[in-house]
Image (cartoon, grey):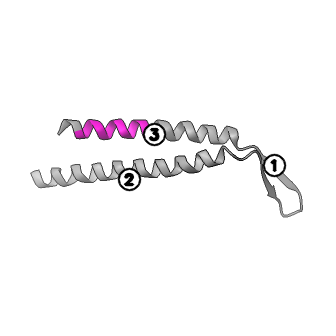
Amino acid sequence: MYRIINIETKLVIILFILLIILNLISLYFIIDLFSYDEIIGYLSNGDEKNCEPRKMSLLFFITSISNLLFASISLMSRLIDK
């Protein structure tokens, strides 16, 4: 029984670290998205579709930062409880 709990604890810690790494990678791309002023898409009928990505990237940035905060706090609390 103790081995199963020990393996499960290690698996949870590894998944937390993986989640933090993936959030840091997504944060890199979100910060890169802040540098774009406008994104232009060309439709099949020849028209152009313009989009300003700043508002959407700000939403992604806030979501990613809060996700990093809660994942880091959860990981630290699990490591301190040991």
Left or right: 5 as drawn, with respect to 55? left
Disc 1 element: strand
* Residue positioned 22% across, 49% down in the render: 9
Q: Disc 1 marks which residue?
A: 50
Q: Disc 3 marks which residue?
A: 67
How far separated are the C-alphas under marks 1 and 3?
30 Å
Task: Indicate the amino acid at tag 3.
Answer: Asn
* Residue positioned 59% across, 46% down in the render: 30
Which residue lies most toward the bottom here? 44
Let me know if residue 67 appears in the view.
yes
Label 2: how many Cα within 10 Å (few below 14, some 14–19, many 20+) = few
Q: Where is residue 7 in the image (x, y as percent from the top left)?
A: 19, 55
Left or right: 13 as drawn, with respect to 57? left
Label 1: how many Cα within 10 Å (few below 14, some 14–19, many 20+) = few
Q: In the rendered structure, does residue 7 fall within the stretch colored magenta?
A: no
How far separated are the C-alphas under marks 3 and 2?
13 Å
Disc 3 element: helix
* Residue positioned 42% across, 51% down in the render: 21
Q: Disc 2 marks which residue?
A: 18
Q: Which sits earlier in the primary sequence, circle 1 or circle 3?
A: 1
Q: Which sits earlier in the primary sequence, circle 1 or circle 2?
A: 2
* Quarter of the image where one finds residue 62: top right
Q: Report the span colored magenta.
A: 68-79
Task: Indicate the amino acid at tag 1.
Answer: Asn
Q: Do the residues labelled 3 and 2 touch (CB within 8 Å)?
A: no
Q: Is the magenta stretch mostly helix, strand or loop?
A: helix
Q: Is residue 62 above or below residue 31?
A: above
Closer to the camera in the image, 57 or 12:
57
Q: In this view, does 75 lie above or below 39?
A: above
Disc 2 element: helix
Q: In the rendered structure, does residue 77 fall within the stretch colored magenta?
A: yes
